[in-house]
Image (cartoon, rainbow, N blue to C red):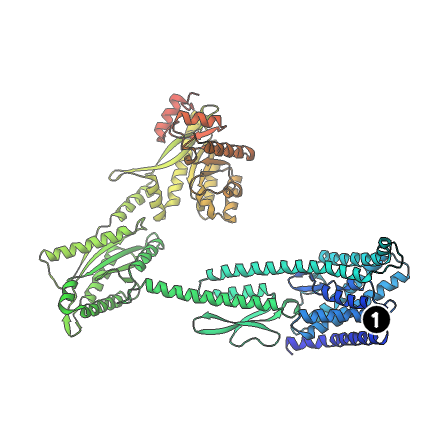
Amino acid sequence: MDTTKQGNLFAAPFAALALGFIGYGLYGLIGSMPESWTLVITVIVGVMICGALQVHVGRRPGFPLVGIAIVMLAIPPMPGFPLLNVSVWAIGLLISQAFMRRNVTHALYLTGLSSVAALAFVLTQTWLADLGVWPPVSFLAATAAYYALFLMGEFLRQWSSAEPDRGIGVSAIDPLRLALVVLVVAVTSTAMNYADTWLIPWLEQDPRADLTPLIVLLAASLFYMFAQHTRFSHIEHRLSALMNAAVELPRITAQGGLAPALLSRTQSIVQAKHVELRDGPPGRHEIGAPVRLEAGHDEYLVASRKAGGVPFEREDERALVTLAHVASETTRAQHEVENLERRANTDDLTGLPNYGAFQKALLEANENRSYHAGIALLFVDLDNFKKLNDTLGHRTGDELLKAVSLRLLEAAGGGDFVSRVGGDEFVLIFSDLDSLEQAKASADRIIEAASQPLLVEGHQLRPALSAGLAFSGHRELDPQALVEDADRAMLHVKRSRRRGGPVTGSGVSVSSHRSSRTNDIISRAIRDDRLLVAFQPIVNLERGEIWAFEALVRYVDPELGPISPPSLVARAKSLGLMNELTRQVITKALDAADEFHRIEPGIECMTVNLELGQITDSELGAYVRDAAQAHPGVSLCIELNERSLHAVTDELRRDAEALQRAGVMLALDDYGSDASSVGALVHFPMNILKVDKSLIDDLGDARQREVIKALQGFGDNLGYTVIVEGVETREMADVLAGLGVRSVQGYHFGRPLSFAQTMSRLRSSGTRAIFDR
C-alpha cells in the first residue's frame, strides 16, 4: 500500500468524525435557536481567522504544527451545550482548513482530530470550573489536554504511515515551544473569559452589558496579526533561501554537480521527505515542474512527501517551480558559455586550439608539474606558405594547413598539446619529460612525420617545416620566456635556409633556455647551503636600544651577481625548495641570535618571514617548534604576511596557536598595505603587529597620524607589540615617538647587514639605536 493510501486510511475515521460534528452542529443550530446568532457567527468567523496561524513546536522542520483556534471556545456560543459548541467551532475550522489545504481529506482529518481534542478542552474546563478551580488553572489544564490529544493523534498518523519515521516521538517536540504555546492560549482564554464576565460590565457600568462578539473578534484579530507576521517571516525566509539558491546554483559547474545540489536545496526549501528527478510528471498529492539539466533532455523535478505528512501548499509548488527554472537557466547558460569558450579557444579552419587556448595550456603545464618534470615547447613554422597561397590559391593553402594540423596531431599521439597560433605557425607542448634529449627525439619524430609528401588539390607537395625547441627542467616564473626562446630557435632555422640552406625537408633548432639555467643556479645554492642572512635592527624608541633583529635572506652568485630576495623566494617556490630555504634561514638566524644575545643580553628576539601554509605540521610547523625550543635564550618570531591571512582556515588558526603554545611568537607583517582587513587583527592569533611603511609615508597628514595612534592603542589594549616599519629619518622617528609608538624599524636605525657586520656593530656600539632624541 503506497503512502497516500495509507495516510487516507488513517484519516478516514477522523474525517467521518469531522462530518459528524459538522452535521450535528448544523442540525443543532437549526433545531434550537441560539440566544445570539451574532455570537455563533462571530465564533465561526473567529475560528476561520485563527485557523491561519500554525505554530511549529518540533525540533524538526515542518513537524509537528499546532493551531491556536481553540481560544475561540473560551466563550462558548451556546452555554450548557458542550458538544454543540464544539460542532459550531468545527464548522469554522473546516472552512479555514479547506481554504488553506490543497487536500480535502487532510482538511477533514485535521478538523476531526481537532474536534475530539476541542471536546476534551471544553469538558475539562467545564468540569474544573464546576469544582470551583481558579479559572487560569482550569484553562491551563484544558489547553494542555487539547494539545496532548492533538499531538497524540499526529504521532499515531506518522507511526501508521507506509514509511513510518521511527525518529518521530515525544523527543521530536521542543518542550519550551510547546509550553509557550500552551501558556499563550491559556492566558488568552482566561483573559477573554474575564473580559466577558467582569471587565466589560465594569467599563460600561452596566452588569447586563454584553459585548461578547466584540471580545471574540478582538482576540481573533490579534492572532490574525500574529499569523500574518509569522507568514511574512516564513515568506522572507523562503525568499532568502530561493535567492541564495539562485546565486549558488549557477556557480556549480562541475560535471554532475548541479543535480545533487538542486535536489538538496529543493528538499530543504519545500521541506519534502523525498525529491527526485524523473521522466514522468508529478502524480496526485505530488508537486513538480519540468527541468532541463542536460542539453536536449527534459525531465521533471518532483517532491512526493512533505515533512510531517501534511499536504504541500501553493507556496511550496511556486518555490519548486522557481528552483526548476533557475536550474534550467543555469544549464542553458553553462552550455552557452561552454560553446562560447570552445569557439573562442578553437581555430575555425583546423579545429586545433588557438593562441588563447595555448596560453592557458602553457600556464597549466608549467604550474601543475612536479619539481623534476620537464616541459618543452616546439614552435613550428610552415616555410614559403605565402608563396604557395599566391601560386596555387588560398583553397590549396587552407587544405595544406588542415593536412599539416592532422599530421601533427597524429604524430603527437594525443598525449601532447597541439595548437595553431598564427597563419602558418603551430606550437606543441610536451609534458612529463625527463630530459632535453627526450624532447628533441619527440620533436624530430613529429617534424619528420609532418613533412612527408602529400597530395593537396591535385598538387604533389612536401611541407617544409622550420621548428625551434625550448626545454624547461623546472617550474618557470615566466613561462613566456619559453615561447620567446622557441620562437628565436625557429627563426634561426629559417634564416639559415634563406642564406642558402635546403628549401625542403625539416629542421629542429634547440634553444638554450636561460630561465632554466638561473633555476639551476638557485637550486644549487639552496642545496649546497650557500644562502646568506642579513639582519636589520628593531629599536625601542623609549630606551633608544635595539631589542630584536629581522632575518632577511640574501644570495650573490659569482656569475649572475646579486639575486633580488623576491626573485630568490619566487624561484625557490617554483622549484619546490621553499621549505629548505626557510629551514636554512631559521637555523642561521637563531644561531646568530644566540651570538647577539651572548654579547648583548638585551637582544631578546629574532624574526623570520614564513609563508602562511608553512606553519602546518605537514610543512614546517614541527621544525619551527623544535628550533625555538633548541634556542631558549632568544624568542623566535614568525612573520606572516597580512595579505595571506585572507585565505586562513580554522586548521591554520589551530596550527598558529600550537606554535604560540610552544613559545613561538607570531607577527602580522605589512599591515596597512593594499587591501588590509580589520578581520586579520581579531581573527588570527598574534603577538606582534608590524605596520607597513605605506601608512607613514606622509606623517604631515593628520589622518595617517590618527591611524598610527589608533593601531598603537589597539596593540596596547590587547597586549600586542606594535612595530612601525620604514622609518628613514629622525623627523619620522620624532613624530612616531610623539604618537606613543615604542618600537620601530627602518634605514634610519640601520640597513640589513651581514652577520659579521652586525657583530662588529654590537661590539662597538652595543644596542645603541644610534638615535639621539
The reply to whether residue 205 is in sight is: yes
Q: Where is residue 29 shown, x and y percent of the image?
A: 82, 73
Q: Is residue 265 left or right of residue 120?
A: left
Q: Is residue 493 left or right of residue 200?
A: left
Image: 368 above or below 450: above
In this orientation, which residue lies closer to the viewer: 613 or 392?
392
Q: Where is residue 381 shown, x and y percent of the image?
A: 20, 60
Q: Where is residue 409 shown, x and y percent of the image?
A: 26, 66
Label 1 neighbour load within 10 Å: few <14, some 14-19, many 20+:
many
Q: Residue furthest right?
A: 131
Exactly how many numbered labels are in the figure?
1
Report which residue position mark 1 lands on. Answer: 83
- At x 30%, y 63%, the residue is 353
Q: Residue furthest bottom?
A: 1
The reply to whether residue 159 is in sight is: no
- At x 65%, y 76%, the residue is 4
Q: Residue furthest left?
A: 500
In this orientation, which residue lies closer to the viewer: 522 or 293?
293
**Of the residues shown, which amino acid type is indicated by label 1?**
Leu
Image: 514 above or below 164: above
Query: Tag 1, which secondary structure?
Result: helix
Image: 208 above or below 102: above
Within the image, what quadrant is residue 188 found in?
bottom right
- At x 36%, y 47%, the residue is 573
Please identify the quadrant where the N terminus is shown. bottom right
In this orientation, which residue lies closer to the viewer: 571 or 296?
296
Please identify the quadrant where the C terminus is shown. top left
Q: Where is residue 267 shown, x and y percent of the image?
A: 57, 65
